[in-house]
Image: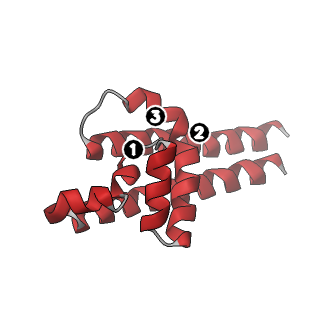
Amino acid sequence: MVERTLRAFAIIATLFVVAGWGAFAWDQTRVASDESQAQIAGDLATSVPDPSPAQEHARERAHSWPREWIDDVNDLLLQPFAAAVDSIHSRWAKRSLASLMALVVYGFGGAYLARFARGRT
């Protein structure tokens, strides 16, 4: 039972991190030619792993509810890694490194714990 729960968490967390990064990449490439309009529309909030309440509110206005739901789950999953990438100035590097750390911890770490739990029970 523990193995299934850990494995399901690892898979679901990985899917959300990948979907969140994909949505970020889509936004960044879609609005690359019109940077200032994208920031006004709330796309700036998608570039940080832990948005402020004002950024979160702007993002909510700019995105559909399914996209915002994915972003909210992704924010929760990336929050522990936000401090580690805070000093990075590049949006791509900041979001990508936080996502990569989350994939290592949640994906690989969760799968490892699931295998470990299977061997111990």
Q: Position of residue 78 (x, y in %)?
A: 51, 42
Give the residue pinned by disc 2. 109
User: Residue most toward the left?
Assistant: 33
Residue in view at x 68 percent, y 39 percent:
113
> Which image quadrant for residue 11?
bottom right
Q: How is the image coloured?
A: secondary structure
Q: Disc 1 or 2, which lies upstream in sequence?
A: 1
Nearer to us in this view, 73 or 103: 73
Nearer to us in this view, 88 or 118: 88
- Residue 82, numbered circle: 3
CA separation, marks 3 and 2? Answer: 18 Å
Give the residue pinned by disc 1. 48
Label 3 with label 1: CB-CB less than 8 Å:
yes
Q: Is residue 11 left or right of residue 48?
A: right
CA separation, marks 1 and 2? Answer: 23 Å
Residue in view at x 76 percent, y 40 percent:
117
